[in-house]
């Protein structure tokens, strides 16, 4: 079993920055694809950023150039650095891990609110 725990959300003004963290614990999920999703009120959950086991990244067009996904293997932590935040980035952000192409795990989510 794999457990994901997000943190780092909060209230930030437009143009500000936040860094989300997702600590991975439990069984070794390797190889794994790690993702950040978000869900805004009244909208479907959408994939924001992906990091493959080979280190290849993918970003949603609306966040490319502003967000960076990265992991620290020593700390078993996935990060999402979010810069130049916009009100439309307001959502609950979820950490997601797909282990060996079979098992999917989700964190509990962390709220990000971008407002003046």
Image: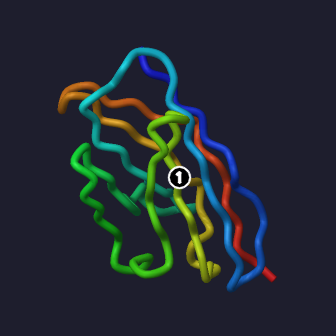
Q: Nearer the viewer, residue 98 or 77?
A: 77
Find numbered disc 1 in the image and state the secondary structure of the residue it sits on: strand
Q: Which residue is drawn at 71% across and 79% down?
A: 16
Q: Position of residue 70 (x, y in %)?
A: 44, 55
Q: Which of 30 and 60 is in front in this view?
A: 30
Residue 40, picture quadrant: bottom right
Q: Residue at x 36, y 20 (%)?
A: 28
Q: In which quarter of the image is the N terminus?
A: top left
Image side of residue 37 versus residue 81, left or right? left
Q: Residue at x 39, y 78 (%)?
A: 64
26 to 17, vertically: above or below: above
Q: Position of residue 113 (x, y in %)?
A: 71, 66
Q: Where is residue 27 in the image (x, y as percent from the top left)?
A: 40, 15
Q: Quadrant of the C terminus?
A: bottom right
Disc 1: which residue: 79
Q: Position of residue 59 (x, y in %)?
A: 34, 69
Q: Residue at x 40, y 63 (%)?
A: 48
Residue 47, picture quadrant: bottom left
Count of number-bearing discs: 1
Image side of residue 97 versus residue 7, left or right? left
Image side of residue 50 versus residue 115, left or right? left
Residue 22, picture quadrant: top right
């Amino acid at each position: 079993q794999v457990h994901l725990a997000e943190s780092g959300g909060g209230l930030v003004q437009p143009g500000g920055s936040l860094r989300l963290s997702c600590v991975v614990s439990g069984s070794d999920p390797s190889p794994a694809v790690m993702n950040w999703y978000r869900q805004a009120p009244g909208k479907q959950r959408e994939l924001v950023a992906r990091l493959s086991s080979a280190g290849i990244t993918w970003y949603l067009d609306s966040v490319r150039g502003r967000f960076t996904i990265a992991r620290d293997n020593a700390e078993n932590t996935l990060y999402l650095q979010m810069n130049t935040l916009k009100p439309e980035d307001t959502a609950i952000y979820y950490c997601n891990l797909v282990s060996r192409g079979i098992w999917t795990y989700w964190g509990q989510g962390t709220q990000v609110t971008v407002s003046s």
